Amino acid sequence: MKKIFIFIVAVTMVAVLPNAANAQCKNFAKKICKLELLPYVHDGIYNATVLSEGETAELYKTFYSGQEYRITICGDENLPPIQYQVLDAERNVLYDNKKHQFAKNFDFKLESSKQLIISIQVQTSDELSDQILSGCVAVLVGFMNIENSFKQY
Amino acid sequence: MKIKLLNISKLTFFSVFTATVLMVGCNGNNGNVEDQIEDSVKTDNLSDEFNKAKQVIYGIPSPIETAMLMKRAGAKYNQDYLNPLLNVGNYTTTKSMSLNLGIYSTDLSFASMFEQSQSTIKYLSATKKLADELGILNAIDKSIITRLENNVNNRDSSMEIISETFMNSNSFLKENDRGEIAAIILTGGWLEGLYIGCLVAKNTASNKEMIERIADQRLSLNTLISLMNEYKNDPNVQSILPDMERLKTVFDKIQTSSSNMEVVEKDGKSIISSKSEVKVSTKVFNEICETITEIRTNIIK
């Protein structure tokens, strides 16, 4: 009976952990990652998920001309660095944070409105381990308040 | 015998509990098993990092972003453009409550962006009522109205509170496997932005930028349809999709051409540069506005 109980508890833990991780992910996005957006105003859309090293995610979003944007991508501190690329619709690379010391933020504006793809990957760890690291990755988009924005050209 | 029965009932309880938890844990994550299989196949091919994404996220303009875009394009506040508050009692189905929660969220952002303090508080009350009826009020800070009332004359703080409220609702729905409701709310918010944009463009002499913004919505509409297709088995989403497709048919009449993009640095900031030409005839513009008005009228009644 004790063995069955332990088995059930173990199975329950495995089942419950993803939901607990989701709740932690929300708090991570709200309380830690969102601060990185300042002084930009968060658009209010929650994009966060649990990723393991080597896993990828993509955000498709239209960005509008004249508006000044900040994309912030951050991951749990136990994760290897998060690489992300900003791609155009034909998947040409416009920005790669790997070339900027895995910068969390990318500030930009567009001359004409476009749909861009933000392609994210958790790097694989250099350390030899039989454990795959996983944790929360949040992708937040903010825009500059009109009065604070630099002039349109 | 009593002890044995107790053990069996304990075992039954734990089995049912475990099965329930497993089902809850798996619900809405049907792709996980497939993802794991796919990931194991991809393990040897991780050098193709960005070629295949595990997860796709569709970013739709939020009500706050929509309000900001409209103000930047020269919109002026007009209460008559918004969905009357008296209508809030008319919405009783999940579909009508979700769509109109999106519509009121855009109206709320619009009022806040133009520092209309009384309207901001009233529209927040309307959104709160619909959120309550949709069962997502727990996601919203109970003191939100008090906080907004205390900060209503500070636009930055008001926008921050609205952004936080929207994020809490949005994350609550996604985490509780009600992503289709989040998608419908965003659809309502986006439709309201387009509707107000049309009214502003029609009632403003210098409306070039607003018309450009309306034409830009063809890009977001494609993303919105992709998002809705993620939930195409949901009957509410199914009933909204034909209107979105109809709107897309009209938007597809806009003629566009564009050059390749390149990134240039200016004052330490990146500018994604490209030339594009967008031609919106008066006929197509009117057709967009007529279609959106018809769709929105059916939603808010």
Image (tube, coloured by chain):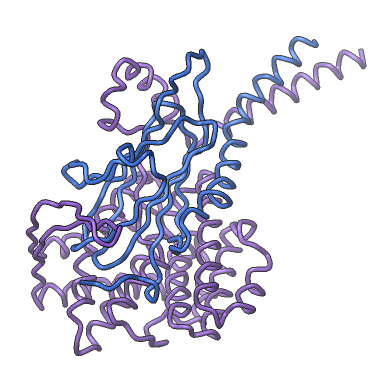
Chain colours: A blue, B purple
B296 vs B287, left or right, is right
As drawn, which residue projects farthest toward the right?
Answer: B2
**Could one spot residue B67 in this view of the protein?**
no
**In the depicted structure, whether residue A2 falls above or below residue B177:** above
B48 vs B132, left or right, is left
Residue B236: percent from left, percent from top: 41, 54
B21 vs B214, left or right, is right
The N terminus of chain B: image quadrant: top right
**In the depicted structure, whether residue B154 falls above or below residue B96:** below
Numbered circles on residues, count:
0
Residue B137: percent from left, percent from top: 62, 60
Residue A56 is drawn in which quadrant? Answer: top left
At 46% across and 43% down in the image, what residue appears?
A: A74
Residue A134: percent from left, percent from top: 51, 28
Residue B190 is drawn in which quadrant? Answer: bottom left
Which of B44 and B81 lies nearest the eye of the viewer? B44
At 50% across and 81% down in the image, what residue appears?
A: B85
At 17% across and 64% down in the image, what residue appears?
A: B251
Residue A113: percent from left, percent from top: 21, 61
At 61% across and 61% down in the image, what residue appears?
A: B140
Which of B162 and B88 lies nearest the eye of the viewer? B162
Which of B144 and B292 lies nearest the eye of the viewer? B144
**In the depicted structure, whether residue B199 falls above or below residue B169:** below
The C terminus of chain B: image quadrant: bottom left
**Could one spot residue A10 in this view of the protein?**
yes
